[in-house]
Image: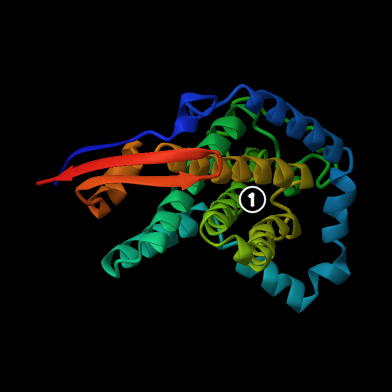
């Protein structure tokens, strides 16, 4: 049982003391503006995916049907299972990565729900005219009607949350592996977005904003967890891995001092 565990990196005394930062407003605004810019082309992109030749293509359809199952529920369950197996196998790197990826998926999914519920944006296949009116909104009806939950895409946010968290953890532990882990992770993360556009469930601008939400939480949760290793979630799920004593770990521009006591 952990009686006391405290770790305070020097950088935690600065701007990363809180999870959300002032720069987040600027980043969110920039991607919201980019999403609006993409929305001008939403109908053309939607109709591109709905071309009969593409809809009848068995390879494209199988890819879409396969990737559509890669969403918040399956990714969250997969994260928990990976975390559990890694904990039993005493693989701390995998355990930590799985935990942080799962945190990011859940946070991105909840945030996306809170945004699209009030907006009530109609999905492409439910818009009037179909696949044409990308600015059809049914305010606050997104909570009650599935067809009005387009913006942002939770499939996209979940995929990019998991991919970004994994890439961030790999980069911290083995920077040389990032060059091949990152492309693979983000190609897979883009799959659910492709599937939702192919199936007429999301506009391209929904996918872009979902990717931003997911990438934001994936990177921020990893950065915050490593800057604050005594945070409540890590202490709850990773705390038993601590050992008694004091450790001093040098890092890039910081020194992390950890003290833990077990009894």
* Residue at horizontal 69 percent and vertical 55 percent from the top: 193
* The one of 127 and 113 positioned closer to us in this rendering: 113
* Residue at horizontal 46 percent and vertical 25 percent from the top: 13
* The one of 206 and 199 positioned closer to us in this rendering: 206
Residue 254: image location, x then y, percent: 50, 38
* The one of 167 and 106 positioned closer to us in this rendering: 167
Classify mark 1: residues with Cα within 10 Å, few (<14), some (14-19) or many (20+). Answer: many
Q: Locate residue 77: give its quadrant.
A: bottom left
In the image, taking residue 44 as reference, residue 253 lies left or right, namely: left
Q: Locate residue 57: give its quadrant.
A: bottom right
* Residue 198 appears in the figure: yes
The correct choice, above or below, for 232 with respect to 164 in the image is: above
The correct choice, above or below, for 145 with respect to 183 in the image is: above
Q: Residue furthest left?
A: 263
In the image, taking residue 8 as reference, residue 116 lies left or right, namely: right
Q: Locate residue 135: give its quadrant.
A: top right
Residue at mark 1: 156
The correct choice, above or below, for 150 with respect to 66 in the image is: above
Residue 212: image location, x then y, percent: 67, 42
* Residue 229 appears in the figure: no
Q: How many marks?
A: 1
Q: Residue furthest bottom?
A: 58
* The one of 100 and 132 positioned closer to us in this rendering: 100
The correct choice, above or below, for 257 with respect to 62 in the image is: above
* Residue at horizontal 46 percent and vertical 46 percent from the top: 250
Q: How is the image coloured?
A: rainbow
Residue 262: image location, x then y, percent: 14, 46
Which element is circle 1 on? Answer: helix
Residue 128: image location, x then y, percent: 80, 39
Q: Residue furthest top?
A: 22
* Residue at horizontal 69 percent and vertical 51 percent from the top: 201
In the image, taking residue 88 as reference, residue 173 lies left or right, namely: right
């Amino acid at each position: 049982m952990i009686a006391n565990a405290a770790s305070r990196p020097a950088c935690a005394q600065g701007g990363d003391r809180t999870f959300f930062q002032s720069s987040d407003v600027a980043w969110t605004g920039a991607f919201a503006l980019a999403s609006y810019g993409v929305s001008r082309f939403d109908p053309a992109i939607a109709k591109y995916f709905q071309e009969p030749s593409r809809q009848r293509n068995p390879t494209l359809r199988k890819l879409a049907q396969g990737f559509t199952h890669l969403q918040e529920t399956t990714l969250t369950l997969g994260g928990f299972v990976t975390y559990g197996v890694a904990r039993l196998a005493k693989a701390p790197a995998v355990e930590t990565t799985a935990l942080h990826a799962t945190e990011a998926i859940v946070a991105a999914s909840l945030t996306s729900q809170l945004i699209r519920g009030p907006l009530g944006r109609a999905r492409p296949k439910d818009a009037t005219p179909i696949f044409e009116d990308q600015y059809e909104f049914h305010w606050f009806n997104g909570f009650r009607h599935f067809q009005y939950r387009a913006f942002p895409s939770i499939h996209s946010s979940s995929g990019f949350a998991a991919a970004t968290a994994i890439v961030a953890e790999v980069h911290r532990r083995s920077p040389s592996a990032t060059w091949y882990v990152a492309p693979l992770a983000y190609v897979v993360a883009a799959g659910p977005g492709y599937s939702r556009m192919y199936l007429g469930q999301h506009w391209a601008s929904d996918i872009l904003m979902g990717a931003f939400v997911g990438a934001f939480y994936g990177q921020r949760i990893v950065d915050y967890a490593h800057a604050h290793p005594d945070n409540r979630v890590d202490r709850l799920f990773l705390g038993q891995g601590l050992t008694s004593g004091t450790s001093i770990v040098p890092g890039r521009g910081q020194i992390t001092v950890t003290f833990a006591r077990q009894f």
